[in-house]
Image (spheres, rainbow, N blue to C red):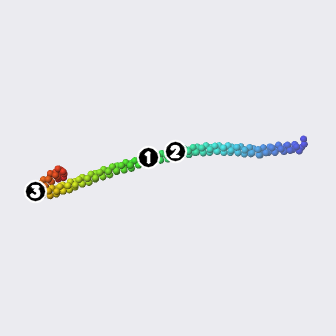
Amino acid sequence: MNATLAAQIINFLILVAILTKLAYKPILTALEERKSRIARSLDEAEQERTLANTMKKESQEQIAAARVQARAIIDEAIALGERSKEAMLQQAREEHARLLKETQEEIERDYQQAINRLRVEVASLAVAAAERIIEKNLDAETNTRLVQSFIKDFTKEKYGELA
């Protein structure tokens, strides 16, 4: 063996020792740190994914609850509208019945007044006609007694308390 080869082997072993001491341990430490950072990043990513899934699920539940609540509000509004409609219809029916009753009562009053006026008019015409007929046949005193008696009897018979 040649001295150069021995020197090269010794140089190589010294270089390996120096590199082991100075470079190998820091490289292994850096690789370990990188490995742990990657593991932490993967753990954090898993936690973020789990959190995202949880938030997504909560969001979907909130949306479903909001839909149920919106449907309940809409149903309540529809029911309130129906109740209001029924109340207005009932009020309109009652108002119609009241107006109909008032109108019928007014018609009945007007009818009774017309009948009473007609009776008075007919009685006046009958008396006038009887007076003309009697005037020709009787004297004035008999005529007056006859007319007064007729009016008295007719009034009591037809009008009762009105006379």
Residue 120 in view: no
Task: Categorize mark 3 by other alpha carbons within 10 Å: few (<14), some (14-19), many (20+).
Answer: few
Task: Categorize mark 2 by other alpha carbons within 10 Å: few (<14), some (14-19), many (20+).
Answer: few
For marks 3 and 1, give the CA distance: 86 Å
Horizontal and vertical percent position of residue 38: 68, 44
Of residues 88 and 110, the one nearer the viewer is 110
* Contact flag, marks 1 and 2 (Cβ < 8 Å): no
For marks 1 and 2, give the CA distance: 21 Å
> Tag 2 or tag 1, which sits nearer the N-term?
2
* Residue 149 left/right relative to 51: left
Horizontal and vertical percent position of residue 54: 58, 43
Q: What residue type is labelled 2?
A: Ala
Q: Mark 3 points at which residue?
A: 138
Residue drawn where x is 81% and y is 45% of the image: 15
> Tag 1 or tag 3, which sits nearer the N-term?
1
Q: What residue type is labelled 3?
A: Leu
Residue drawn where x is 37% and y is 48% of the image: 90
Q: Which amino acid does label 1 sit on?
A: Ala
Q: How many numbered marks are there?
A: 3
For marks 3 and 2, give the CA distance: 106 Å
Q: In which quarter of the image is the N terminus?
A: top right
Q: Mark 1 points at which residue?
A: 79
Badge nearest the viewer, 1 or 2? 1
- SS of the residue at dot 3? loop
Residue 129 in view: yes
Horizontal and vertical percent position of residue 11: 84, 45
- SS of the residue at dot 2? helix
> Tag 2 or tag 3, which sits nearer the N-term?
2
Q: Residue 65 carries which label?
A: 2
Residue drawn where x is 41% and y is 47% of the image: 83
Horizontal and vertical percent position of residue 63: 54, 46
Residue 31 falls in which quadrant of the image?
top right
